[in-house]
Image (cartoon, rainbow, N blue to C red):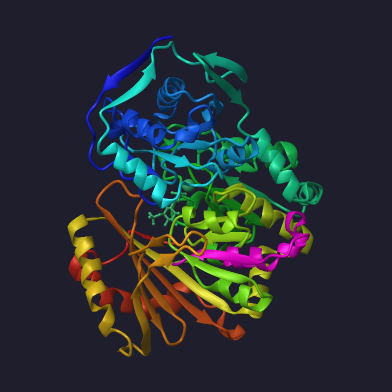
Amino acid sequence: MQIVKIDTAPFSEQRPGTSGLRKKVRIFQQPHYLENFVQSIFDTQQALVGGTLVVGGDGRYYNREATQIILRMAAANGVACVIVGQGGLLSTPALSCLVRKYNAQGGIVLSASHNPGGPDEDFGIKFNAANGGPAAEAVTEAIYQRTTEINGYQTLESAEIDLDHIGASRLDGMQIQIIDPVTDYAALMQTLFDFDCIRRLLTSSHFRMRFDAMHAITGVYATRILEEMLGAPAGTVINSRPLPDFGGGHPDPNLVHAHELVHMTQGHNGVDFAAASDGDGDRNMILGQNFFVTPSDSLAIIAANAHLIPGYQQQKIDGVARSMPTSQAVDRVADKLGMDCFETPTGWKFFGNLLDAGRITFCGEESFGTGSSHVREKDGLWAVLFWLNLLAVKQQSVATIVQDHWREFGRNYYTRHDYEGVDKAAATHLMQDLRNRLGSLPGRQMQGHTVEYADDFAYTDPIDNSRSEHQGLRVGFTDGSRIIYRLSGTGTQGATLRVYLETYEATPEKQQQATASVMAPLVSIAQELAQIVQKTGRDNPTVIT
Ligand code: VG1
Ligand code: CO
Protein backbone atom coordinates (compact mmCIF):
# COMPACT_ATOMS: atom_id res chain seq x y z
CA MET A 1 0.00 0.00 0.00
CA GLN A 2 1.16 3.45 -0.83
CA ILE A 3 2.12 5.85 1.98
CA VAL A 4 1.32 9.35 0.84
CA LYS A 5 2.53 12.63 2.24
CA ILE A 6 -0.03 15.41 2.03
CA ASP A 7 1.09 19.01 2.31
CA THR A 8 -0.86 21.19 4.74
CA ALA A 9 -0.69 24.51 6.52
CA PRO A 10 -1.40 24.97 10.23
CA PHE A 11 -4.88 25.81 11.53
CA SER A 12 -5.14 28.32 14.31
CA GLU A 13 -6.60 27.43 17.68
CA GLN A 14 -5.92 23.71 17.88
CA ARG A 15 -5.04 24.03 21.55
CA PRO A 16 -6.73 21.32 23.67
CA GLY A 17 -8.92 22.62 26.51
CA THR A 18 -9.92 21.00 29.80
CA SER A 19 -10.44 17.69 28.01
CA GLY A 20 -9.03 17.55 24.49
CA LEU A 21 -9.73 19.53 21.34
CA ARG A 22 -13.44 20.30 20.95
CA LYS A 23 -14.96 22.13 18.02
CA LYS A 24 -18.05 22.14 15.87
CA VAL A 25 -18.28 19.11 13.56
CA ARG A 26 -18.02 21.39 10.53
CA ILE A 27 -14.66 22.64 11.69
CA PHE A 28 -13.40 19.07 12.09
CA GLN A 29 -14.74 18.23 8.61
CA GLN A 30 -12.55 20.80 6.90
CA PRO A 31 -9.91 19.08 4.77
CA HIS A 32 -6.75 18.35 6.81
CA TYR A 33 -8.15 19.70 10.11
CA LEU A 34 -8.36 16.42 12.00
CA GLU A 35 -5.33 15.09 10.13
CA ASN A 36 -3.13 17.97 11.26
CA PHE A 37 -4.01 17.34 14.90
CA VAL A 38 -3.52 13.58 14.62
CA GLN A 39 -0.16 14.02 12.85
CA SER A 40 0.86 16.37 15.66
CA ILE A 41 0.15 13.56 18.10
CA PHE A 42 2.34 11.12 16.14
CA ASP A 43 5.09 13.72 15.67
CA THR A 44 5.35 14.41 19.39
CA GLN A 45 4.61 10.94 20.83
CA GLN A 46 7.50 8.90 19.51
CA ALA A 47 6.63 5.85 21.63
CA LEU A 48 3.66 5.22 19.35
CA VAL A 49 6.01 4.32 16.50
CA GLY A 50 6.30 0.55 16.72
CA GLY A 51 3.87 0.63 19.64
CA THR A 52 0.22 -0.05 20.39
CA LEU A 53 -2.55 2.54 20.24
CA VAL A 54 -6.17 2.18 21.42
CA VAL A 55 -8.83 4.07 19.46
CA GLY A 56 -12.53 4.52 20.11
CA GLY A 57 -15.24 7.09 20.53
CA ASP A 58 -18.70 7.72 21.89
CA GLY A 59 -20.53 7.06 18.61
CA ARG A 60 -21.37 10.65 17.89
CA TYR A 61 -21.65 12.04 14.39
CA TYR A 62 -18.27 11.81 12.55
CA ASN A 63 -16.98 9.04 14.88
CA ARG A 64 -16.66 6.50 12.05
CA GLU A 65 -15.08 8.83 9.53
CA ALA A 66 -12.57 10.04 12.11
CA THR A 67 -11.71 6.45 13.07
CA GLN A 68 -10.95 5.62 9.43
CA ILE A 69 -8.69 8.65 9.12
CA ILE A 70 -6.81 7.83 12.31
CA LEU A 71 -6.26 4.17 11.41
CA ARG A 72 -4.80 5.04 8.02
CA MET A 73 -2.55 7.67 9.53
CA ALA A 74 -1.47 5.32 12.31
CA ALA A 75 -0.39 2.73 9.74
CA ALA A 76 1.46 5.35 7.69
CA ASN A 77 3.22 6.60 10.82
CA GLY A 78 4.53 3.19 11.81
CA VAL A 79 2.22 2.23 14.67
CA ALA A 80 2.53 -1.56 15.12
CA CYS A 81 -0.94 -2.34 16.44
CA VAL A 82 -4.21 -0.51 16.91
CA ILE A 83 -6.93 -1.85 19.20
CA VAL A 84 -10.35 -0.51 18.19
CA GLY A 85 -13.75 -1.00 19.78
CA GLN A 86 -16.24 -2.64 17.44
CA GLY A 87 -17.93 -0.01 15.29
CA GLY A 88 -15.30 2.49 16.45
CA LEU A 89 -17.00 2.59 19.85
CA LEU A 90 -15.41 2.78 23.28
CA SER A 91 -16.44 4.62 26.40
CA THR A 92 -13.74 6.87 27.84
CA PRO A 93 -13.21 4.70 30.96
CA ALA A 94 -13.17 1.53 28.84
CA LEU A 95 -10.46 3.02 26.66
CA SER A 96 -8.46 3.83 29.77
CA CYS A 97 -8.92 0.24 30.95
CA LEU A 98 -7.69 -1.13 27.60
CA VAL A 99 -4.61 1.09 27.41
CA ARG A 100 -3.57 -0.18 30.84
CA LYS A 101 -4.49 -3.82 30.34
CA TYR A 102 -2.72 -4.19 27.00
CA ASN A 103 0.23 -1.95 27.88
CA ALA A 104 -0.49 0.36 24.99
CA GLN A 105 1.61 3.46 24.46
CA GLY A 106 -1.48 5.63 24.27
CA GLY A 107 -5.09 6.06 23.28
CA ILE A 108 -7.21 8.38 21.19
CA VAL A 109 -10.73 9.16 22.39
CA LEU A 110 -13.20 10.58 19.90
CA SER A 111 -15.73 12.49 21.92
CA ALA A 112 -16.99 15.88 22.95
CA SER A 113 -18.35 14.18 26.07
CA HIS A 114 -21.50 15.87 27.36
CA ASN A 115 -21.73 18.33 24.45
CA PRO A 116 -24.52 17.65 21.91
CA GLY A 117 -23.74 15.72 18.72
CA GLY A 118 -24.84 15.88 15.10
CA PRO A 119 -23.73 17.66 11.93
CA ASP A 120 -24.22 21.09 13.49
CA GLU A 121 -23.01 20.18 16.95
CA ASP A 122 -19.74 19.18 18.56
CA PHE A 123 -16.92 16.74 17.96
CA GLY A 124 -13.72 16.22 19.89
CA ILE A 125 -10.46 14.33 20.09
CA LYS A 126 -8.32 13.63 23.12
CA PHE A 127 -4.97 11.90 23.54
CA ASN A 128 -4.45 9.61 26.51
CA ALA A 129 -1.00 8.61 27.70
CA ALA A 130 0.40 5.16 28.47
CA ASN A 131 -1.06 5.27 32.00
CA GLY A 132 -4.52 5.36 30.39
CA GLY A 133 -5.22 8.89 31.53
CA PRO A 134 -5.66 12.22 29.78
CA ALA A 135 -2.28 13.54 28.68
CA ALA A 136 -0.65 15.98 31.08
CA GLU A 137 -0.57 19.67 30.22
CA ALA A 138 3.05 19.48 29.04
CA VAL A 139 2.04 16.83 26.47
CA THR A 140 -1.06 18.61 25.19
CA GLU A 141 0.98 21.80 24.96
CA ALA A 142 3.65 20.02 22.89
CA ILE A 143 0.95 18.65 20.56
CA TYR A 144 -0.50 22.13 20.25
CA GLN A 145 2.90 23.68 19.48
CA ARG A 146 3.34 21.11 16.75
CA THR A 147 -0.03 22.07 15.20
CA THR A 148 1.22 25.64 14.84
CA GLU A 149 4.12 24.66 12.58
CA ILE A 150 2.94 21.50 10.84
CA ASN A 151 3.34 21.38 7.07
CA GLY A 152 2.29 17.88 6.14
CA TYR A 153 0.92 14.55 7.28
CA GLN A 154 1.26 10.93 6.32
CA THR A 155 -1.52 8.60 5.41
CA LEU A 156 -2.26 5.52 3.35
CA GLU A 157 -4.34 5.08 0.27
CA SER A 158 -6.57 2.22 1.29
CA ALA A 159 -10.08 0.97 0.90
CA GLU A 160 -12.61 1.47 3.71
CA ILE A 161 -11.48 -0.43 6.81
CA ASP A 162 -13.98 -2.88 8.30
CA LEU A 163 -14.69 -1.74 11.86
CA ASP A 164 -17.63 -4.03 12.50
CA HIS A 165 -16.23 -7.53 12.62
CA ILE A 166 -14.41 -8.66 15.71
CA GLY A 167 -10.99 -10.06 14.91
CA ALA A 168 -7.54 -9.18 13.66
CA SER A 169 -6.58 -7.84 10.26
CA ARG A 170 -3.67 -5.96 8.72
CA LEU A 171 -3.42 -2.53 7.21
CA ASP A 172 -0.07 -2.37 5.50
CA GLY A 173 2.45 -3.21 8.24
CA MET A 174 0.01 -2.49 11.08
CA GLN A 175 -2.20 -4.94 12.90
CA ILE A 176 -5.80 -3.91 13.59
CA GLN A 177 -7.66 -5.66 16.37
CA ILE A 178 -11.38 -5.04 16.48
CA ILE A 179 -12.57 -6.00 19.94
CA ASP A 180 -15.83 -6.13 21.82
CA PRO A 181 -16.01 -2.73 23.57
CA VAL A 182 -17.50 -4.09 26.80
CA THR A 183 -15.74 -7.38 27.65
CA ASP A 184 -12.50 -6.11 29.22
CA TYR A 185 -14.25 -3.30 31.07
CA ALA A 186 -16.91 -5.63 32.48
CA ALA A 187 -14.19 -8.04 33.63
CA LEU A 188 -12.49 -5.22 35.50
CA MET A 189 -15.78 -4.29 37.20
CA GLN A 190 -16.16 -7.91 38.34
CA THR A 191 -12.85 -7.69 40.18
CA LEU A 192 -14.03 -4.63 42.13
CA PHE A 193 -17.64 -5.30 43.03
CA ASP A 194 -19.67 -8.14 44.51
CA PHE A 195 -21.76 -9.05 41.47
CA ASP A 196 -23.70 -11.77 43.33
CA CYS A 197 -24.76 -9.35 46.01
CA ILE A 198 -25.76 -6.71 43.44
CA ARG A 199 -27.66 -9.36 41.45
CA ARG A 200 -29.73 -10.25 44.53
CA LEU A 201 -30.64 -6.60 44.93
CA LEU A 202 -31.49 -6.03 41.27
CA THR A 203 -33.64 -9.14 41.02
CA SER A 204 -35.53 -8.56 44.27
CA SER A 205 -39.13 -7.48 43.90
CA HIS A 206 -38.60 -4.66 46.44
CA PHE A 207 -36.06 -2.79 44.39
CA ARG A 208 -36.60 -0.80 41.23
CA MET A 209 -33.95 1.02 39.29
CA ARG A 210 -33.54 2.93 36.02
CA PHE A 211 -30.36 3.82 34.19
CA ASP A 212 -30.53 6.55 31.55
CA ALA A 213 -27.89 6.12 28.85
CA MET A 214 -29.15 9.29 27.16
CA HIS A 215 -28.74 7.63 23.74
CA ALA A 216 -25.00 7.65 24.24
CA ILE A 217 -22.20 5.13 24.67
CA THR A 218 -23.16 3.67 28.07
CA GLY A 219 -26.26 2.12 26.54
CA VAL A 220 -23.99 -0.62 25.27
CA TYR A 221 -22.20 -1.06 28.60
CA ALA A 222 -25.17 -0.72 30.92
CA THR A 223 -27.37 -3.13 28.98
CA ARG A 224 -24.66 -5.79 29.07
CA ILE A 225 -23.61 -5.28 32.68
CA LEU A 226 -26.84 -4.33 34.45
CA GLU A 227 -29.40 -6.33 32.47
CA GLU A 228 -27.45 -9.26 31.03
CA MET A 229 -24.82 -9.91 33.69
CA LEU A 230 -26.59 -8.66 36.81
CA GLY A 231 -30.12 -9.70 35.94
CA ALA A 232 -31.86 -6.32 36.16
CA PRO A 233 -35.24 -6.52 34.41
CA ALA A 234 -35.28 -5.65 30.72
CA GLY A 235 -36.12 -1.96 30.40
CA THR A 236 -33.98 -0.97 33.38
CA VAL A 237 -31.70 0.82 30.93
CA ILE A 238 -33.59 3.56 29.12
CA ASN A 239 -32.51 5.46 25.99
CA SER A 240 -30.10 2.62 25.52
CA ARG A 241 -29.43 2.86 21.79
CA PRO A 242 -26.44 5.08 21.00
CA LEU A 243 -27.40 7.60 18.33
CA PRO A 244 -25.08 9.94 16.38
CA ASP A 245 -27.04 12.94 17.64
CA PHE A 246 -28.00 11.45 21.03
CA GLY A 247 -31.62 11.74 19.99
CA GLY A 248 -31.25 15.50 19.74
CA GLY A 249 -30.56 15.83 23.47
CA HIS A 250 -27.72 17.03 25.61
CA PRO A 251 -26.01 13.86 26.89
CA ASP A 252 -25.24 15.54 30.18
CA PRO A 253 -26.39 13.70 33.31
CA ASN A 254 -27.73 16.45 35.52
CA LEU A 255 -31.10 17.49 36.89
CA VAL A 256 -31.79 19.67 33.87
CA HIS A 257 -30.80 17.46 30.95
CA ALA A 258 -31.79 14.09 32.46
CA HIS A 259 -35.22 15.34 33.51
CA GLU A 260 -36.99 12.25 32.11
CA LEU A 261 -35.06 10.11 34.56
CA VAL A 262 -35.48 12.53 37.44
CA HIS A 263 -39.23 12.34 36.91
CA MET A 264 -39.12 8.54 37.33
CA THR A 265 -37.73 8.94 40.85
CA GLN A 266 -40.43 11.32 42.00
CA GLY A 267 -43.58 10.70 43.99
CA HIS A 268 -44.67 7.67 46.02
CA ASN A 269 -44.17 5.38 43.10
CA GLY A 270 -40.71 6.72 42.23
CA VAL A 271 -37.99 4.16 41.64
CA ASP A 272 -35.55 3.40 44.47
CA PHE A 273 -32.42 4.14 42.52
CA ALA A 274 -31.67 5.92 39.27
CA ALA A 275 -28.51 6.90 37.49
CA ALA A 276 -27.39 8.43 34.23
CA SER A 277 -24.18 8.85 32.31
CA ASP A 278 -22.92 11.25 29.66
CA GLY A 279 -21.94 11.02 25.98
CA ASP A 280 -18.65 9.18 26.55
CA GLY A 281 -19.57 7.35 29.75
CA ASP A 282 -17.26 9.02 32.22
CA ARG A 283 -19.85 11.05 34.15
CA ASN A 284 -22.59 9.87 36.49
CA MET A 285 -25.61 11.20 38.28
CA ILE A 286 -26.96 9.31 41.29
CA LEU A 287 -30.57 9.61 42.43
CA GLY A 288 -32.69 7.89 45.05
CA GLN A 289 -36.44 8.03 45.44
CA ASN A 290 -37.20 11.76 45.61
CA PHE A 291 -33.54 12.35 46.27
CA PHE A 292 -30.56 13.80 44.39
CA VAL A 293 -27.01 13.02 45.49
CA THR A 294 -24.64 15.86 44.63
CA PRO A 295 -21.48 14.59 42.93
CA SER A 296 -19.42 16.15 45.72
CA ASP A 297 -21.39 14.20 48.35
CA SER A 298 -21.13 11.06 46.25
CA LEU A 299 -17.33 11.26 46.32
CA ALA A 300 -17.34 11.78 50.10
CA ILE A 301 -19.71 8.84 50.65
CA ILE A 302 -17.66 6.57 48.40
CA ALA A 303 -14.50 7.43 50.34
CA ALA A 304 -16.23 6.90 53.69
CA ASN A 305 -17.65 3.50 52.71
CA ALA A 306 -14.79 1.95 50.77
CA HIS A 307 -14.32 -0.73 53.43
CA LEU A 308 -17.68 -2.23 52.43
CA ILE A 309 -16.72 -2.82 48.80
CA PRO A 310 -14.63 -5.88 47.87
CA GLY A 311 -12.21 -4.12 45.50
CA TYR A 312 -11.21 -1.63 48.17
CA GLN A 313 -11.58 -3.36 51.52
CA GLN A 314 -8.17 -5.02 51.46
CA GLN A 315 -6.28 -1.81 50.96
CA LYS A 316 -5.66 1.11 53.22
CA ILE A 317 -7.07 4.21 51.58
CA ASP A 318 -4.16 6.65 51.88
CA GLY A 319 -5.62 9.56 50.06
CA VAL A 320 -8.38 11.21 48.08
CA ALA A 321 -8.49 14.18 45.75
CA ARG A 322 -11.07 16.59 44.44
CA SER A 323 -10.98 19.35 41.89
CA MET A 324 -10.83 22.78 43.46
CA PRO A 325 -14.47 23.78 42.80
CA THR A 326 -15.77 20.45 44.17
CA SER A 327 -17.28 20.81 47.65
CA GLN A 328 -15.17 20.13 50.70
CA ALA A 329 -17.36 17.23 51.81
CA VAL A 330 -14.61 14.73 51.04
CA ASP A 331 -12.11 16.82 53.02
CA ARG A 332 -14.20 16.14 56.12
CA VAL A 333 -14.08 12.41 55.50
CA ALA A 334 -10.33 12.51 54.88
CA ASP A 335 -9.82 14.49 58.04
CA LYS A 336 -11.79 12.10 60.20
CA LEU A 337 -10.44 8.90 58.68
CA GLY A 338 -6.83 10.05 58.46
CA MET A 339 -6.42 10.22 54.69
CA ASP A 340 -4.50 12.81 52.68
CA CYS A 341 -6.73 15.12 50.67
CA PHE A 342 -5.51 16.92 47.55
CA GLU A 343 -7.14 19.89 45.86
CA THR A 344 -6.36 19.94 42.14
CA PRO A 345 -7.37 22.14 39.20
CA THR A 346 -10.43 21.19 37.16
CA GLY A 347 -9.90 18.31 34.72
CA TRP A 348 -9.10 14.65 35.22
CA LYS A 349 -5.53 14.99 33.93
CA PHE A 350 -4.53 16.52 37.26
CA PHE A 351 -5.36 13.31 39.16
CA GLY A 352 -3.07 11.17 36.98
CA ASN A 353 0.21 11.68 38.80
CA LEU A 354 -1.37 11.22 42.24
CA LEU A 355 -3.03 7.98 41.11
CA ASP A 356 0.15 6.69 39.44
CA ALA A 357 2.17 7.42 42.58
CA GLY A 358 -0.35 5.56 44.75
CA ARG A 359 -1.07 8.71 46.76
CA ILE A 360 -4.83 8.58 46.20
CA THR A 361 -7.46 5.88 45.65
CA PHE A 362 -10.58 7.96 44.98
CA CYS A 363 -11.03 11.26 43.22
CA GLY A 364 -13.86 13.33 41.88
CA GLU A 365 -15.23 16.51 40.45
CA GLU A 366 -18.44 18.41 41.13
CA SER A 367 -19.23 18.05 37.41
CA PHE A 368 -20.63 14.55 37.90
CA GLY A 369 -17.27 12.83 37.74
CA THR A 370 -16.10 10.16 40.19
CA GLY A 371 -13.44 7.53 39.86
CA SER A 372 -10.69 5.52 41.47
CA SER A 373 -7.29 4.00 40.86
CA HIS A 374 -8.83 1.20 38.74
CA VAL A 375 -8.42 3.34 35.58
CA ARG A 376 -7.16 6.86 34.88
CA GLU A 377 -10.44 8.44 33.80
CA LYS A 378 -13.59 9.24 35.67
CA ASP A 379 -15.95 6.35 35.31
CA GLY A 380 -19.73 6.64 35.19
CA LEU A 381 -20.78 3.01 35.41
CA TRP A 382 -18.14 2.30 38.04
CA ALA A 383 -19.82 4.89 40.28
CA VAL A 384 -23.23 3.34 39.61
CA LEU A 385 -21.93 -0.13 40.50
CA PHE A 386 -20.26 1.26 43.62
CA TRP A 387 -23.59 2.71 44.74
CA LEU A 388 -25.46 -0.48 43.91
CA ASN A 389 -22.96 -2.52 45.89
CA LEU A 390 -23.30 -0.10 48.79
CA LEU A 391 -27.11 -0.22 48.68
CA ALA A 392 -26.98 -4.01 48.58
CA VAL A 393 -24.67 -4.23 51.59
CA LYS A 394 -26.36 -1.56 53.69
CA GLN A 395 -29.93 -2.43 52.78
CA GLN A 396 -30.85 1.20 53.21
CA SER A 397 -32.29 3.79 50.88
CA VAL A 398 -30.12 6.31 49.07
CA ALA A 399 -31.63 9.12 51.16
CA THR A 400 -30.88 7.35 54.44
CA ILE A 401 -27.28 6.70 53.48
CA VAL A 402 -26.71 10.32 52.52
CA GLN A 403 -28.54 11.79 55.52
CA ASP A 404 -26.65 9.54 57.92
CA HIS A 405 -23.45 10.71 56.26
CA TRP A 406 -24.42 14.36 56.80
CA ARG A 407 -25.21 13.68 60.43
CA GLU A 408 -21.76 12.23 60.95
CA PHE A 409 -19.66 14.59 58.84
CA GLY A 410 -21.86 17.67 58.37
CA ARG A 411 -23.52 18.76 55.14
CA ASN A 412 -21.90 20.82 52.42
CA TYR A 413 -24.78 22.51 50.61
CA TYR A 414 -23.67 22.99 47.03
CA THR A 415 -24.83 24.47 43.77
CA ARG A 416 -23.32 25.52 40.46
CA HIS A 417 -24.61 28.29 38.22
CA ASP A 418 -23.55 28.26 34.56
CA TYR A 419 -23.89 31.26 32.27
CA GLU A 420 -23.52 29.72 28.83
CA GLY A 421 -22.82 31.39 25.51
CA VAL A 422 -21.66 34.65 27.08
CA ASP A 423 -19.70 37.06 24.92
CA LYS A 424 -16.04 36.01 25.20
CA ALA A 425 -14.63 39.47 25.70
CA ALA A 426 -17.23 40.26 28.36
CA ALA A 427 -16.47 37.05 30.24
CA THR A 428 -12.72 37.62 30.10
CA HIS A 429 -13.19 41.17 31.31
CA LEU A 430 -15.38 40.01 34.22
CA MET A 431 -12.70 37.57 35.34
CA GLN A 432 -9.87 40.05 34.90
CA ASP A 433 -11.68 42.76 36.79
CA LEU A 434 -12.50 40.45 39.69
CA ARG A 435 -8.92 39.16 39.70
CA ASN A 436 -7.70 42.72 40.07
CA ARG A 437 -9.97 43.30 43.06
CA LEU A 438 -9.18 40.07 44.93
CA GLY A 439 -6.56 41.75 47.12
CA SER A 440 -9.10 44.19 48.52
CA LEU A 441 -11.68 41.58 49.49
CA PRO A 442 -10.37 39.94 52.71
CA GLY A 443 -12.15 41.39 55.74
CA ARG A 444 -15.02 42.74 53.69
CA GLN A 445 -18.53 42.11 55.06
CA MET A 446 -21.25 41.08 52.67
CA GLN A 447 -24.78 40.21 53.77
CA GLY A 448 -23.57 38.82 57.07
CA HIS A 449 -20.63 36.97 55.52
CA THR A 450 -17.01 38.04 56.04
CA VAL A 451 -14.43 37.33 53.36
CA GLU A 452 -11.52 35.38 54.84
CA TYR A 453 -9.39 34.95 51.71
CA ALA A 454 -9.58 35.60 47.97
CA ASP A 455 -7.10 34.24 45.47
CA ASP A 456 -6.39 33.08 41.93
CA PHE A 457 -5.97 29.33 42.33
CA ALA A 458 -2.63 27.87 41.24
CA TYR A 459 -1.45 24.30 41.69
CA THR A 460 1.94 22.70 42.00
CA ASP A 461 1.79 19.00 41.26
CA PRO A 462 3.33 17.25 44.28
CA ILE A 463 4.81 14.49 42.10
CA ASP A 464 6.47 16.31 39.21
CA ASN A 465 6.35 19.88 40.52
CA SER A 466 4.68 21.15 37.36
CA ARG A 467 2.82 24.38 37.93
CA SER A 468 -0.64 25.35 36.65
CA GLU A 469 -1.82 28.90 37.16
CA HIS A 470 -5.09 30.80 36.76
CA GLN A 471 -7.27 27.80 37.58
CA GLY A 472 -10.19 29.75 38.99
CA LEU A 473 -10.89 32.61 41.39
CA ARG A 474 -11.69 31.60 44.96
CA VAL A 475 -13.45 33.68 47.55
CA GLY A 476 -13.64 32.02 50.97
CA PHE A 477 -15.67 33.24 53.95
CA THR A 478 -14.99 32.88 57.65
CA ASP A 479 -17.86 30.39 58.08
CA GLY A 480 -16.31 28.00 55.54
CA SER A 481 -18.55 29.06 52.64
CA ARG A 482 -16.90 29.50 49.25
CA ILE A 483 -17.66 31.11 45.91
CA ILE A 484 -15.56 30.10 42.91
CA TYR A 485 -15.50 31.63 39.44
CA ARG A 486 -14.07 29.89 36.37
CA LEU A 487 -14.40 30.01 32.63
CA SER A 488 -15.17 26.67 31.00
CA GLY A 489 -12.50 25.00 28.90
CA THR A 490 -14.81 22.59 27.05
CA GLY A 491 -17.34 24.86 25.33
CA THR A 492 -17.33 25.51 21.60
CA GLN A 493 -19.34 28.73 21.45
CA GLY A 494 -18.63 32.02 23.19
CA ALA A 495 -17.66 31.64 26.83
CA THR A 496 -19.28 29.82 29.71
CA LEU A 497 -18.93 31.37 33.14
CA ARG A 498 -19.22 28.86 35.96
CA VAL A 499 -19.99 30.02 39.48
CA TYR A 500 -19.64 27.35 42.17
CA LEU A 501 -21.17 27.92 45.60
CA GLU A 502 -20.77 26.00 48.80
CA THR A 503 -21.73 26.39 52.43
CA TYR A 504 -21.25 24.07 55.42
CA GLU A 505 -23.89 23.03 57.96
CA ALA A 506 -22.84 20.97 60.96
CA THR A 507 -26.16 21.01 62.84
CA PRO A 508 -28.32 17.98 61.96
CA GLU A 509 -31.58 19.89 62.46
CA LYS A 510 -30.51 22.34 59.76
CA GLN A 511 -29.43 19.76 57.21
CA GLN A 512 -32.83 19.15 55.64
CA GLN A 513 -33.41 22.50 53.97
CA ALA A 514 -33.84 23.14 50.28
CA THR A 515 -30.50 23.93 48.64
CA ALA A 516 -31.86 26.90 46.70
CA SER A 517 -33.05 28.70 49.83
CA VAL A 518 -29.89 27.99 51.81
CA MET A 519 -27.74 29.22 48.94
CA ALA A 520 -29.80 32.31 48.08
CA PRO A 521 -27.69 34.80 50.09
CA LEU A 522 -24.44 33.43 48.63
CA VAL A 523 -25.89 33.54 45.12
CA SER A 524 -26.64 37.20 45.49
CA ILE A 525 -23.19 37.88 46.96
CA ALA A 526 -21.67 36.04 44.00
CA GLN A 527 -23.59 38.15 41.50
CA GLU A 528 -22.70 41.35 43.26
CA LEU A 529 -19.02 40.54 43.72
CA ALA A 530 -18.41 39.82 40.05
CA GLN A 531 -21.07 42.23 38.76
CA ILE A 532 -22.45 39.41 36.67
CA VAL A 533 -25.61 41.15 35.54
CA GLN A 534 -23.84 44.36 34.56
CA LYS A 535 -20.94 42.64 32.82
CA THR A 536 -22.72 39.81 31.00
CA GLY A 537 -26.19 41.27 30.55
CA ARG A 538 -27.60 38.10 32.09
CA ASP A 539 -30.08 38.24 34.95
CA ASN A 540 -30.07 34.51 35.48
CA PRO A 541 -27.85 31.51 34.82
CA THR A 542 -28.61 29.19 31.89
CA VAL A 543 -28.21 25.99 33.88
CA ILE A 544 -28.29 25.40 37.63
CA THR A 545 -26.98 22.07 38.91
C1 VG1 B 1 -15.94 20.42 32.42
C2 VG1 B 1 -16.02 20.14 33.89
C3 VG1 B 1 -14.76 19.44 34.36
C4 VG1 B 1 -14.56 18.16 33.53
C5 VG1 B 1 -14.55 18.50 32.05
C6 VG1 B 1 -14.48 17.27 31.17
O1 VG1 B 1 -14.87 21.30 32.15
O2 VG1 B 1 -16.20 21.32 34.62
O3 VG1 B 1 -14.87 19.15 35.72
O4 VG1 B 1 -13.35 17.53 33.87
O5 VG1 B 1 -15.74 19.21 31.71
O6 VG1 B 1 -15.55 16.41 31.43
P1 VG1 B 1 -15.04 22.89 31.94
O7 VG1 B 1 -13.66 23.39 31.60
O8 VG1 B 1 -16.03 23.07 30.86
O9 VG1 B 1 -15.56 23.41 33.24
V1 VG1 B 1 -16.13 15.45 30.21
O10 VG1 B 1 -17.19 14.37 30.84
O11 VG1 B 1 -16.81 16.71 29.24
O12 VG1 B 1 -14.82 14.81 29.41
CO1 CO C 1 -17.59 12.88 29.55
Is residue 347 shown above or below 250? below
Work out whether residue 97 or residue 180 is closer to the camera in this orientation and state it: 97
Tell me where residue 270 sits by quadrant. Answer: bottom right
Magenta extent: 297-324
Is residue 366 shown above or below 521? above
Tell me where residue 27 sits by quadrant. Answer: top left
Q: Residue at x 40, y 84 (%)?
A: 477
The reply to whether residue 416 is in sight is: yes
Work out whether residue 403 or residue 44 is closer to the camera in this orientation and state it: 44
Classify residue 119 as left or right of residue 314: left
Return the x and y of residue 25 as percentages of the image width and height.
Answer: 32, 34
Is residue 85 shown above or below 482? above
Return the x and y of residue 318 as percentages of the image width and height.
Answer: 66, 66
Work out whether residue 164 or residue 188 is closer to the camera in this orientation and state it: 188
Tell me where residue 166 sits by quadrant. Answer: top right
- Quarter holding the C terminus is bottom left
Q: Residue at x 23, y 61 (%)?
A: 427
Q: Residue at x 80, y 51 (%)?
A: 197
